[in-house]
Image: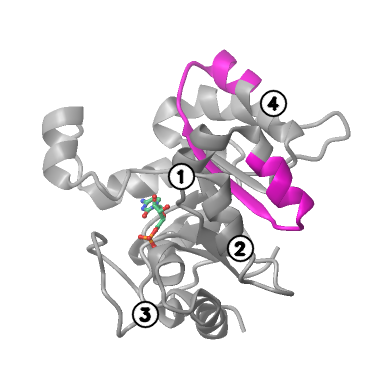
Amino acid sequence: MGKDVIIACDFDSKEKTLAFLDKFTGRKPFVKIGMELYYAEGPAIVRELKARGHKIFLDLKLHDIPNTVKKAMAVLSRLDVDIVNLHAAGTTAMMTAALEGLTREDGTRPLLIAVTMLTSTDQSAMENDLLIREPIANVVLHYAETAKNAGLDGVVCSPLEAEKVHERCGASFLTVTPGVRFADSDKGDQKRVMTPAEAKKIGSDYIVVGRPITAAADPVAAYERCMKEFAD
Ligand code: C5P
C-alpha cells in the first residue's frame, strides 16, 4: 500500500456513514472505523464497508493482557480489515501476542500499528498521572522502537513526529498521522497540525483526516484536495 488519505468516519450510525460515503460516486476512499462507529454498529459495519470495496483501518486501540489481545486480534483478522492498532504501552509481550493472533493460517495478516503516547497526553499529565519522567519526544520514539522490535508495521503519531520516527525506525516503518488541516481551515480541538502537503513533505505514509472532509460543505471536493496535496 502506498501513500493514501484515510477518512475518519467518526459517525454514530450506519445510516450516517453510508449517506456520507454515498457522496463518493465512483471513488472508494480508505476509511477509518473508530470506537464510536464500531460500538454503535459492531462487526456488521466493517463487513458492509469491506463489501462496498473500501480499505479499512479499524482503530480500536487494544490494550489488555497478552492472551486477551491475541484472541481479540484473531477475531478482528477474520473481518479482513487492512490495518488494526493497539497501545504500545501494553508492552512487547502484548504486541507479540497480538501479531500471533492476527496472523492467519496462510501466513497473511492485516497491518498492525501502535499508538505511542496519545497526542492528548502532555508532558505534565505523563509525569503526574503516569509517573513517566522523560521528555515526551523520547517516550514516543522509545515506544515506536519497541513496536518495531516486536515486529509491528508502524505507529500512529503526530505528523510532527513522523520524521523522527522514520529516522529511528527506518523509512519502511509506517507513520499514520492524524492532526491534518488545510492551511485555510479551522483547527477545531487539534492543536499541533500540518497541512496535507506538509505531511507529505515530512514523509507521513498515511494521513487520517476527519472533520476537514466530513464537515466540509463539499466532502468529495475536500477529499480530492487532500489526495491532490498528499498522494498525487
Ligand atoms: O476530525 P479530525 O481530522 O481531527 O479527526 C482525526 C481522527 O484521528 C479522529 O478519528 C481522532 O480520534 C483520530 N486521532 C487523533 N489523534 C491521535 C489519534 C487518533 O486525532 N493521536
Q: Earlier in the sequence, mark 2 or mark 3?
A: 2
Q: Tell me if label 1 and label 4 are in contact, CB under 8 Å.
A: no
Q: Are marks 4 and 3 in contact (CB under 8 Å)?
A: no
Location of residue 125 with respect to 177 vertically, above or below: above
Q: Amino acid at mark 1?
A: Asp
Dot 3 beta carbon under 8 Å from ligand 1:
no
Mark 4 or mark 3: name the one nearer the start of the chain: 4
- List the residue tagged with mark 1: 12
Please provide percent x and percent y for residue 140. 34, 47
Q: In the rendering, at what x and y percent does residue 149 appear?
A: 55, 39
Name the residue nearer the viewer: 211 or 120.
Answer: 211
* Structural distance between the alpha carbons of marks 4 and 3: 37 Å
Q: Secondary structure at mark 1?
A: loop
| Magenta-span inclusion, residue 174 | no
Q: Is residue 133 visible?
A: no
Residue at left offset 15%, top offset 38% = 125
Vertical arrangement, residue 41 with respect to residue 101, above or below = below
Q: Which mark is residue 21?
A: 2
Q: CA distance from mark 2 to mark 3?
A: 21 Å
Disc 2 or 4, which lies upstream in sequence? 2
Q: Quadrant of ligand 1?
A: bottom left
> Circle 4 sits on which residue?
75
Range of residues picked out in magenta? 45-71
* Circle 1 or circle 4, nearest the eye: 1
